[in-house]
Amino acid sequence: MTSTAPVPADAGLAQLRHAAAGCRACELWEPATQTVFGEGPATARIVVVGEQPGDQEDRAGEPFVGPSGTLLDRALQAAGIDRRDAYVTNAVKHFRFEPRGERRIHQSPNAEHLQACRPWLAAEFAVLQPEVVVCLGAVAAKALISPSFRITRERGQLLPWTPPGATWHEEDEDGAPAQTWVIATTHPSAVLRTPEEGRPAAFDAMVADLRVVATALP
Ligand code: URA
């Protein structure tokens, strides 16, 4: 069962984060520790979108602070992008998991979870008006680019794109980018899951995709 996310109109990031903390638009809020909203400066030119918070992110209340986050930081740095200049968020802002004994096993969000959370992402884009959006992995890429998007075939390509709910391109506001671009790369957890002998190449391929972003934004 989903309802409507309580997104305040014309809100800044702090107000959105505050409102999202009380979101009950889908059932994921209940077993989760807290909403994990996006993090980063309002001036960020790059928005990085993952799938959903993991176990450590759920506990910390911040995106990409666990092992995937460490790998993401390394990949961004190798590509010449300082994570502190980017805004990092997720397509779904609550951790979906299945309890198994003491452990909480990651479950991918379904279409309803993505739909319920989409207004938050749209509100983040409206504040940030990013130049480039980087989708990490298939869940984010399918949600934001196209359901038929295939990471293996289409990764590393900058595509002209209109963020959900975007009005700023039409309004031509001062300082707003004339065009937003989207690009997809592998999810850091997929690199971590790659068997050891192939992991350096998987990491390098992710860095090569991120370099496309760094080159587009001198
Ligand atoms: N994986 C994600 O997609 N997002 C996070 O924040 C952490 C792990």
Image (cartoon, helix red, strand yellow):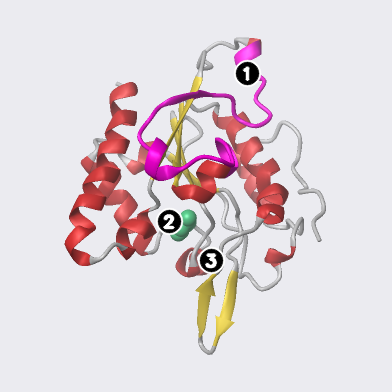
Q: Is residue 214 left or right of residue 35?
A: left
Q: Which mark is residue 168?
A: 1
Q: Nearer the viewer, residue 177 or 9?
A: 177
Q: Is residue 142 above or below residue 173?
A: below
Q: Is residue 161 magenta?
A: yes
Q: Residue at x 53, y 50 (%)?
A: 139
Q: Is residue 121 visible?
A: yes
Disc 2: CA contacts within 10 A as few (<14), some (14-19) or many (>=20) = many
Circle 1/circle 3 CB separation < 8 Å = no
Q: Residue at x 51, y 42 (%)?
A: 141
Q: Which mark is residue 58?
A: 3
Rendered location of residue 4, percent (x, y): 81, 48
Locate the N terminus and report the quarter of the image it occupies.
Answer: bottom right
Looking at the rendered structure, the kind of residue marked 2 is Phe
Q: Which mark is residue 64?
A: 2
Q: Which numbered disc flags the more N-terminal residue, 1 or 2?
A: 2
Q: Is residue 206 left or right of residue 197?
A: right
Q: Is residue 142 magenta?
A: no
Circle 1/circle 2 CB separation < 8 Å = no
Q: Nearer the viewer, residue 154 or 74?
A: 154
Mark 3 residue element: helix
Q: Is residue 19 visible?
A: no
Q: Which numbered disc flags the more N-terminal residue, 2 or 3?
A: 3
Q: Real-space Cα distance between discs 1 and 2?
A: 28 Å
Give the extent of the magenta segment: 143-170
Queried on whether the Cβ of the residue with tag 2 lies below 8 angstroms from ligand 1, the answer reads: yes
